[in-house]
Amino acid sequence: MKTLLLIIDDDSDFIADFSILLQKDYDLISATNSSDGIKLFRQKSPDIILLDLMLNDGTNGLEVMQKIKFEDDSVPIIIITDYSSVDNAVEAIKLGAYDYISKSPDLEKLRLIIQKSLKERQLKYHTKTLEQQSDHKFKFLIGESIVSQKLKEQVTLFAKNDNTILITGESGVGKEVVARHIHRLSKRKDNPFISINCAAIPHQLIESELFGHEKGSFTGADKRKLGKFEIANHGTIFLDEVSEIHLDAQVKLLRVLQEKEFERVGSTKIINVDIRIIAATNKELKELVDKNLFRDDLYYRLDVLPIQVPPLRDRKEDIPALVAHFLQLSCEELKIPFPGISTEAINLLRQYDWPGNIRELQNNIIRATIVANGEEIKPHHINSRLHQINDSDKISIDKIPTTLEELNEMKKESINAASRAIERVFLENLLHKFDWNISKAAESIGINRTNLHKMINKCGLKKNGI
């Protein structure tokens, strides 16, 4: 399908000439006055508009442009002007027009302007779509736990300025979700957010991917390619697994951070960029610096505003809310009614430590939704591996070692299970003593209510076993 181009101009001869020149590459529709032009815009939803600034029906082209932009800000508008009204054309660009051309344009230049405007529109549409999907599928840090609230406050604060951010945390905790949220809260929110997984790109191609390359710069480079930094200009670039960038590319990355400039592979032309960098890693960068595997100057440039995303095991009180969210998403994708989930199933999920974090939880909810087949999700619908792990914790109190010899003979896993068993028995006795009065129980052992609640949730204890 060809690009649909709308021409609004009171000069019918000009429209006819333009139609002959452009009909090979574009589908053309036209109007000779503002009212017909706006009507066609609403009926046909053109991909791009050529608009004359001086219309004979007494309407200023700027007014027409503002009406169109009010209804669809994404459609590119190219102003048609003569040399006497260049100032008005410049004013139109300030108000949102993409560019302007003369009444006798260079056809090749016009084609380039149209192509460039359509590419930018497509990129903005793609970015907006991704952000809408992200808003829906990856709500930012669902839950009201203390660690979640602190992280939300930190993210909101850091989004207000333009410094580099380094996000750390285990795999699956949602580092990219945090980065996208920062972008949406920042002054760059209307510009691209470009994400790149540095670990997924071969070392020999990382520079080309980040900074672009010229045609013929290496074997297989059969045409010029724009790098991610160039595409993300004026927006935010997210470098996931930044620790995987090799040392040569680290030098170029450092230059972008310091000088806001770089060169494509195979070129000496300097390209300037205005961009915010958010990096992420699940490794200890400082340890890599000590081993000379990561540049110390780059590390300090990245670690201006550090954010530590907590693992799911440190915010288990958020699990019910996360489960409800992922369950709703699963039902929407499977096109089935919301089945609900039993208290026993929730308790089972809360007892597991989730080494794969939120990503693992979401995958388990998808699986459970499919297995339950429209019924309420119960423990037997949940991955059997979770049952096996939780069963291993159920060590009898009379099997807990009482001598050093018995302790030395125990495996590490058994020691951990024994520790959990001791904690559970202690809490059961404590809560029974104070008739589940959390405040009094916490005070008696010298901790606050919040920490005691965490211990209770960790052990999966419920009043009267409910």
Image: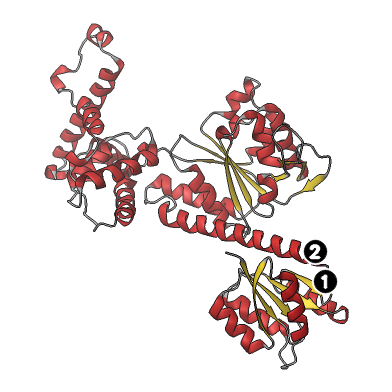
Instruction: Say which residue appears at 20% left-offset and 13% top-offset.
Output: 402
Is the image coloured rainbow, by chain, by secondary structure, or in one colour? secondary structure
- Of 315 and 325, the residue lying toward us: 325
**Location of residue 311 by image quarter:** top left
Residue 379 drawn at (x, y percent): 18, 40
Q: Can you identify the residue that label 1 sits on?
A: 105
- Of 191 and 389, the residue lying toward us: 191
Residue 141 in sight from this viewpoint: yes
Residue 457 placement, left or right of 283: left
Please name the amino acid that badge 1 sits on. Answer: Pro
Instruction: Say which residue appears at 13% left-offset and 19% top-offset.
Output: 398
Q: Can you identify the residue that label 2 sits on?
A: 109
Rendered view: 266 above or below 64: above
Rendered view: 225 above or below 282: below
**Element class at badge 2:** helix
Dot 1, how many residues are within 10 Å of its Cα: few (below 14), some (14-19), or many (20+)?
few
Q: Residue furthest left?
A: 464
Q: Which mark is residue 412?
A: none
- Of 82 and 428, the residue lying toward us: 82
Q: Contact (CB < 8 A) between labels 1 and 2?
A: yes
Instruction: Say which residue appears at 61% left-offset and 57% top-offset.
Output: 123
**Element class at badge 1:** loop
Instruction: Say which residue appears at 30% left-offset and 48% top-offset.
Output: 323
